[in-house]
Amino acid sequence: MSHVAQMLRVAAAEPVEPPLDGPVVRVRARFGKTWAAPGTGFFIADWLSSVVTARHVVGLAGGAAPSEVSVKVLSGGRWIELETVAIAFPSGGVAADDVAVVRVNARCTSALRMATLDAPVAAQIWGYPLGNEAPRPPVVVPARARPADARVLLDRQGRIGMSGGPVVALVGEGPPVAVVGIYLGPGPSGGGRAQALAAPSVLASMEAAMACA
């Protein structure tokens, strides 16, 4: 599997460790002088310096990487911008898996963990809809999720701007932490769709981003 992997800048200082209000972040990419519409991303436990998001949030359809990526986290009730140092995603145009990893100069803890969906389950889509600029927790959209090859199909759609956010399964006791997919947008049958988080392309993108940072 080949990847587009690009270093954005050399880290200016030691990694910061901001106390996060939650693992979901706002992501926006710049291509030349133009900023694309914002999307969503998230941190996963064990990947303290990497933001997982959808490829179409930070890359052009033909596979071009951005010249800049903005990542904002909510900390203490206010937005903090993290320094981004690298980005990686699968190559291959529109046929490639819709996943990307943004490496940041920070160490951010998260309770979210990768999980594999093998049966239908109640779930939630987490993300920041377009226009939701205020420093508040992400919007939560309840949905029913079911596995479909390397995808997760949902009976409901998230809102525009929530692409790249986590699809979290509601299983067991306590707060939901099992991420089964990366929300991609509308699905073919009127619901939503997500990239399965356990797909090999996710780990490969993570390794590619780490290698070039």
Image (cartoon, rainbow, N blue to C red):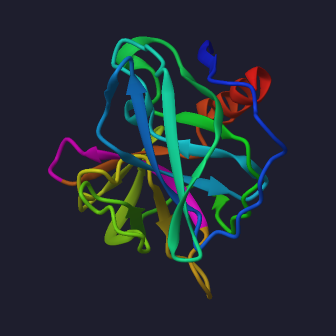
Give percent across and percent down for residue 97: 47, 28
Judge by depth and name the residue closer to the eye, 113 or 24.
24
Q: Residue at x 64, y 69 (%)?
A: 20
Question: How far across and how far down the image is residue 58, in percent?
Answer: 44, 31
From which residue to which does the magenta span run?
178-190
Image location of residue 194, percent across then percent down: 40, 47
Position of residue 128 in the picture relative to residue 11 (left or right) = left
What is the quadrant of the C terminus in the image?
Answer: top right
Residue under the point 69% across and 69% down: 111
As drawn, is 190 to the left or to the right of 200?
left
Q: Nearer the viewer, residue 177 or 189?
A: 177
* Residue 95: x %, y % from top left: 38, 18
Q: Which residue is drawn at the image coordinates 71% and 63% (left, top)? A: 18
Q: Quadrant of residue 124?
A: bottom left
Quadrant location of residue 108? bottom right
Snapshot quadrant of residue 128: bottom left
Q: Residue furthest front?
A: 12
Residue furthest left in the image = 190
Q: How many marks on residues?
A: 0
Q: Pick out the residue farthest to the bottom.
A: 173
Q: Nearer the viewer, residue 134 or 185?
A: 134
- The residue positioned 48% from the left and 38% from the top of the image is 150
69 in magenta: no
User: From the viewer's perspective, is residue 195 above or below residue 91?
Assistant: below
Q: Nearer the viewer, residue 184 or 118?
A: 184
Quadrant including the N terminus: top right
Q: Main secondary structure of the magenta part?
A: strand
Left or right: where does residue 152 sit relative to residue 208? left
